[in-house]
Amino acid sequence: MPRNNRPKGFRKGDDDDDEPIDVIRLRDGIKKTVFKNGVEFSVQTTSGKTAEETKRWICPFCNLSFGPGISHVVAWESAEGPGKRRHFHNICWQKFQGRLF
């Protein structure tokens, strides 16, 4: 007789009503905390693929504009909240050392 590795009480189809995992949203939307020069930032990466086509951002580090489809970092000072978030190019965020105003 074959071995059964399922937990007790498991019935086939029990986990069918779970919602599917949105892998793209999960990968892009993971928020983490980063400290730069003693300032705590909340940071999320995004692919920019879900943004409106007319949306544009200006990177506060290099002052260049970019739009949807460009992978970038969204950061805000944790004390200020996401209302003052800024969108950085990935490399610009790595180089950034300062405060957001």
Image (cartoon, rainbow, N blue to C red):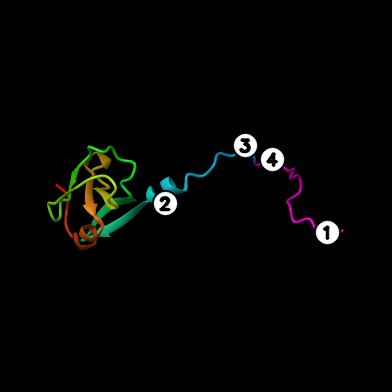
Give the CA separation, mark 1 to mark 3: 28 Å
Label 2 sits on residue: 27
Give the CA separation, mark 3 to mark 2: 23 Å
Q: Position of residue 22 (x, y in %)?
A: 47, 44
Secondary structure of residue under mark 3: loop
Label 1 sits on residue: 2
Label 3 sits on residue: 17
Q: Of the residues under marks 1 and 3, which one precedes in the sequence?
A: 1
Give the CA separation, mark 4 to mark 2: 27 Å
**Magenta highlight on residue 97:** no
Q: Amino acid at mark 4?
A: Asp
Label 4 sits on residue: 14
- The crowding category of the residue bearing disc 3, from other C-alpha atoms within 10 Å (few below 14, some 14 to 19, many at least 20), is few
Residue 61 versus residue 76: which sits nearer the camera? Answer: 61
- The crowding category of the residue bearing disc 1, from other C-alpha atoms within 10 Å (few below 14, some 14 to 19, many at least 20), is few
Secondary structure of residue under mark 2: helix
- The crowding category of the residue bearing disc 2, from other C-alpha atoms within 10 Å (few below 14, some 14 to 19, many at least 20), is few
Q: Is residue 3 above or below residue 70?
A: below
Q: Of the residues under marks 4 and 1, which one precedes in the sequence?
A: 1
Residue 14 versus residue 53: which sits nearer the camera? Answer: 53
The kind of secondary structure the magenta stretch mainly shows is: loop
Magenta range is 1-15
Tell me, yes or no, whether the two marked residues, 3 and 4, touch with CB atoms within 8 Å. Answer: no
